[in-house]
Amino acid sequence: MKPTELRVALFSGNYNYVRDGANQALNLLVGHLLARGATVRVYSPTTATPAFAPTGDLVSVPAFALPGERGEYKIGRGLPARTRRDLDAFAPNLVHVSAPDLLGHAALTYARRRRIASVASLHTRFETYLRYYGVGFIEPLIERLLKRFYNRADRVVVPSPSIRTLLHRWGVTTPISIWSRGIDHDRFHPSRRSLDWRRSLGIADDAVAIGFLGRLVKEKGLGIFAKVTAELRRRGVAHKVLVVGKGPADQWFAEKAPGAVFAGFQSGDELGRAVASMDVFFNPSVTETFGNVTTEAMAAGVPVVAARATGAVDLIDEGVNGYLVDPTDVAGYADAIQRIVADPALRRRLGEAGHAKAASYRWDTANQAALDTYVELLDG
């Protein structure tokens, strides 16, 4: 099977209507596939005001808004007759599903009934979200449902070895391959650091800026982040909190982290400048499957303190480019950050080591691995 013979139907719960790491990875993958001569058609819920232009042909599928605090996200209603007719006309020889939602389940059923090869990719640890919204007790049930979903595919691709281990622990027996992630090394680089930009936000040149980067949603560990910075204040550790991003929990987080500087949403080279202008990157999230924001901080030469959880454990070498802490250990996080704040030489050494390690993460290499998985599966 040559790449030019591939006809890939890609199903996404959010291809471009809200910007996140998962859909940016999917768009970059589609760009890579198209550049290698494959034919791709994407099926996803859409909005009239997408966050960015989609890569490739995008077909809108019927959807409803997610109830509760996360109404910006949509759930595809499956494969109605009109969508199935479009899919039949496209005649894929491979179906790729990127979310375990109604649309993803329907796409796997479609592929099975028509004997079409299927790949499922895992981007987010959805089962962990529940603990942030008061329903963590059903997490074991969600894990069982996810096990069933991934066992229905012919191949699973995950971004990190720790996620492969997690799926094996759940009982997923489908063969699993690694589709890693890359970095824009020109954008995320130590040279992007800007004292002028920091000053414009009221951050002094000699202040140690502890950074958060990502959508402001509770499942990113905002509660732990706020508790840790409160502990640092209690200890008298001089620092400034720099928050880069926005989201539905903006106001909630601002109340929990008084005195923090909110730089808002940043993109492009401005995002690279914001990340490089941090002094410590703090990522207490346990929902990551890879940790794009962590590698971006590493590439920018910023030392990392992160939760000892999937994604981060594949990226952080303890005491070499950062520190890993048990996810809810507030004192442990504060100890690690305090150590970095107090020792500029350590801060510099950790940052340099992270920058060196991040150099191996390249989008072309990562996306070629996904393409190779497609071809291998079809050559079967």
Image (cartoon, rainbow, N blue to C red):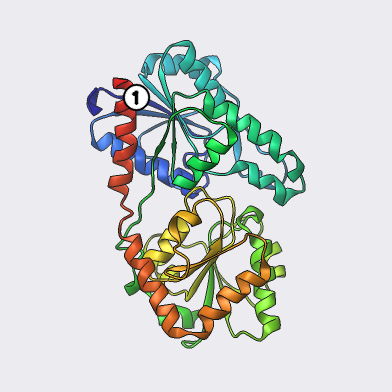
Q: Which residue is drawn at 65% across and 31% down?
A: 144
Q: Position of residue 284 (x, y in %)?
A: 59, 61
Give the camera-side residue of 126 and 71: 126
The C terminus appears in which quarter of the rendering? top left
Give the secondary structure at mark 1.
helix
Image position of 57 (left or right of 220): left
Q: In which quarter of the image is residue 296?
A: bottom left
Q: Position of residue 214 (x, y in %)?
A: 53, 58
Residue 53 shows in the view = no
Q: Please, is residue 186 above or below residue 163 in the view?
A: below
Q: Residue at x 43, y 65 (%)?
A: 297
Q: Name the residue under label 1.
A: 377
Give the camera-side residue of 376 and 41: 376
Image position of 138 (left or right of 161): right
The tally of labels here is 1
Mark 1: which amino acid? Leu
The N terminus appears in which quarter of the rendering? top left
Q: Where is residue 323 in the image (x, y as percent from the top left)?
A: 51, 68
Residue 335 shows in the view = yes
Q: Please, is residue 89 above or below residue 180 in the view?
A: above
Mark 1: give few (<14), some (14-19) or many (20+) Cα within 10 Å. some
Image position of 359 (left or right of 252): left
Q: Where is residue 289 in the image (x, y as percent from the top left)?
A: 51, 47
